[in-house]
Image: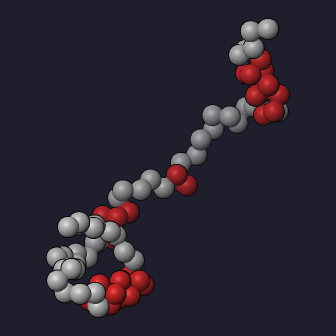
Amino acid sequence: MHRLVIDVNENVLDKIIYFLRNLPKKDVKVIEDHVLQEKKIKDNYIDFSQFQVDTFKEIKDPVAWQRQIRDEWNRD
């Protein structure tokens, strides 16, 4: 016996429930159908668009800067 825990969007939930209910009752049992609150889901993600990172702003030629950094790795 296995227990499967999945998060499902509303637009496919009915298809999954239909499928599960049409499987043999002795083999599959829906134990819980818990609705997640949208706010709790969003709390798990970080929206990086709200941050502005100016770390590399002063680099005029990024390719030359990368080459300079890589040259430090060479031991020739």
Q: How many marks?
A: 0
Q: Residue furthest top?
A: 76
Please name the residue shown 81% across and 33% down the image: 63
> In the picture provided, is 50 more to the left or to the right than 57?
left
Which x, y percent locates residue 13? 36, 83
Please name the residue shown 20% across and 67% down the image: 1
Closer to us: 16 or 25: 25
The answer to whether 20 is drawn above or below residue 38 in the figure is: below
Closer to us: 23 or 33: 23
Q: Quadrant of the C terminus?
A: top right
Q: Is residue 17 visible?
A: no
Please name the residue shown 16% across and 76% down the image: 31
> In the picture provided, is 69 more to the left or to the right than 2?
right
Q: Is residue 32 visible?
A: yes
Q: How is the image coloured?
A: secondary structure
Which x, y percent locates residue 22? 29, 91
- Please identify the quarter of the rendering in which residue 59 is found: top right
Closer to us: 34 or 65: 34
Which x, y percent locates residue 7? 34, 70
The answer to whether 40 is drawn above or below residue 49 in the figure is: below
Please name the residue shown 23% across and 66% down the image: 2
Which x, y percent locates residue 8? 36, 74
Closer to us: 20 or 68: 20
The answer to whether 68 is drawn above or below residue 32 in the figure is: above
